Image (cartoon, rainbow, N blue to C red):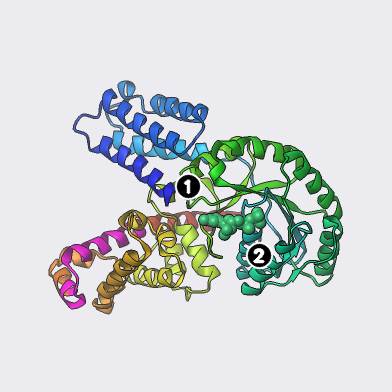
């Protein structure tokens, strides 16, 4: 959770400033200094950090602000926007199409996390209704095919490989041809990456590329290399036509932020980030939701997608969110879903504010906390559950009753309701966007 620490430090710096009695130049400089130091500790390139510092100073120009401007809001928004710019590659990745074979080839140095990530990605598409499979083109390491086989079997994904061939391009071509014939939609080819030298790695990549004609080549980069990711992703971008990057191990190391910003600086699209060793620990990467989550503001879209992919939601919450509504019952259902979705510390980050609330807790403590939240909901009447929570403000004695009934405290009930309020606010925004979109479509 090292990236979360980075988020917490930046958040703390911003809240310290917005709470300061005098919001003056000195206080602003103090905040910027703390943000800069947090980013440097995450191994973000000093050129990028210095650019961010100047941009914040220039946008939040305290001297020339007209009196009507909400300084606090402006500072929060500026910091958010600058962080988004820092990790934005400004390049749209390839999106696989249904009903046709999409060949995706993986490259990367040994140990970067290729084989693990291949299976995670195949599973990602499989749960989204694609017919997915894996091809092992690592003929160099005897254990490589075994490892892929094991992962694939666990995830119930068809695979292809050879224990005897020594020609990776031939094995890759054979596997891809077989799966194309069988009408697979996502065909992922794993390669060896045993190379010491970048040049050899890219030579082999070019050979296999010629043999299988991939629709996309993905380079897997280990986040722990930090800023060095820039040189690697630059070289890769120059060699691969439709190249995108997955950064793995963003969970365990301070330099995750450094690697992401370094790759973004080369304008190579980052498609996913790996956030752990478990099969589900793969997150789609997009600059805004990433920063939003980093700062504990949640990722509603990501949550909704995830819940849909796992077919946990019966459609009610999604419908509500699209209408701009989020009731206490919706919060309870989502809490229950999260408990079913595995590594809690990761899922909690998707709910606005919840990541922060659980910050520093391990999965067991977090799980206990969420259980208590569910008990609270279970002590509510149907009318209360289906409400927007205002009922409790009008009649605070309801909170006392619910706290007593659930064996929790009024403080915890309040916490839950403020959680639901944040979510309702976000749902309202999303519902508004949805209505505008429908209006625009109607006009067309
Ligand atoms: P390959 O040599 O590139 O195929 O790398 P592997 O897929 O064998 O992965 C090397 C190690 O990294 C394994 O122990 C994986 O479990 C681990 N790994 C891969 N992705 C992640 C990740 O996102 N987070 C963490 N913590 N470990 C990962």
- Magenta residues, start to end: 402-423
Q: Distance between the residues labelled 1 and 2?
A: 25 Å
Residue 255 is left or right of residue 381, and the answer is: right
Label annotation for residue 373: none
The stretch drawn in magenta includes residue 416 = yes
Above or below residue 222? Residue 120 is below
Q: Dots 1 and 2: beta carbons under 8 Å? A: no
Which class describes the residues within 10 Å of circle 2: few (<14), some (14-19), or many (20+)? many
The residue at the far top in this view is: 63
Residue at 44 percent of width and 59 percent of height: 346
Residue at 24 percent of width and 29 percent of height: 23
* Residue 166 on image: x %, y %: 85, 58
User: If you read the primary sequence from the N terminus, does the residue marked by circle 1 or circle 2 appear first?
Assistant: 2
Above or below residue 96? Residue 31 is above
Residue 261 is left or right of residue 165, and the answer is: left
Residue assigned mark 1? 253
Residue assigned mark 2? 122
The stretch drawn in magenta includes residue 22 = no
């Amino acid at each position: 959770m090292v990236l979360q620490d980075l988020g917490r430090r930046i958040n703390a710096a911003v809240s310290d400033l917005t709470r300061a009695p005098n919001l003056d130049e000195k206080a602003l400089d103090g905040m910027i200094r703390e943000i800069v130091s947090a980013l440097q500790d995450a191994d973000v390139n000093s050129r990028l950090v210095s650019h961010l510092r100047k941009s914040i100073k220039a946008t939040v120009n305290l001297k020339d602000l007209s009196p009507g401007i909400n300084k606090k809001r402006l500072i929060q928004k500026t910091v958010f926007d600058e962080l988004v710019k820092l990790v934005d590659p400004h390049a749209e990745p390839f999106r696989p199409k249904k009903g046709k074979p999409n060949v995706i080839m993986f490259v990367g140095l040994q140990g970067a996390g290729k084989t693990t990530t291949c299976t995670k990605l195949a599973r990602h598409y499989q749960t989204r209704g694609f017919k997915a499979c894996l091809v092992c083109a690592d003929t160099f390491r005897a254990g490589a095919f075994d490892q892929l086989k094991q992962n694939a079997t666990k995830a119930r994904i068809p695979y292809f490989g050879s224990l005897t061939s020594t020609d990776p391009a031939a094995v890759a071509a054979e596997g891809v041809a077989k799966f194309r014939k069988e009408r697979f939609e996502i065909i992922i080819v794993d390669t060896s990456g045993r190379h010491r030298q970048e040049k050899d790695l890219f030579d082999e990549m070019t050979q296999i590329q010629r043999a299988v004609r991939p629709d996309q080549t993905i380079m897997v980069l280990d986040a722990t290399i930090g800023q060095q990711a820039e040189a690697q992703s630059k070289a890769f971008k120059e060699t691969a036509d439709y190249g995108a990057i997955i950064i793995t191990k963003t969970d365990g190391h301070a330099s995750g932020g450094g690697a992401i910003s370094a790759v973004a600086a080369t304008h190579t699209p980052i498609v996913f980030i790996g956030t752990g060793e478990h099969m589900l620990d793969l997150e789609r990467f997009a600059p805004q939701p990433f920063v939003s989550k980093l700062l504990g503001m949640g990722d509603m879209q990501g949550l909704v997608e995830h819940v849909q992919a796992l077919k946990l939601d019966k459609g009610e919450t999604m419908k509500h969110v699209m209408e701009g509504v989020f009731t206490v019952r919706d919060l309870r259902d989502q809490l229950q879903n999260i408990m079913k979705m595995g590594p809690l510390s990761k899922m909690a980050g998707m709910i606005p504010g919840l990541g922060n609330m659980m910050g520093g807790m391990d999965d067991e403590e977090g799980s206990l906390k969420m259980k208590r939240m569910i008990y609270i909901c279970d002590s509510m009447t149907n009318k209360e559950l289906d409400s927007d929570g205002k009922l409790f403000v009008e009649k605070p004695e309801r909170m006392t009753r619910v706290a007593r009934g659930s064996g929790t405290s009024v403080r915890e009930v309040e916490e839950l309701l403020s959680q639901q309020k944040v979510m309702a606010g976000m749902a309202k925004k999303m519902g508004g966007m949805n209505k505008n979109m429908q209006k625009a479509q109607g006009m067309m």
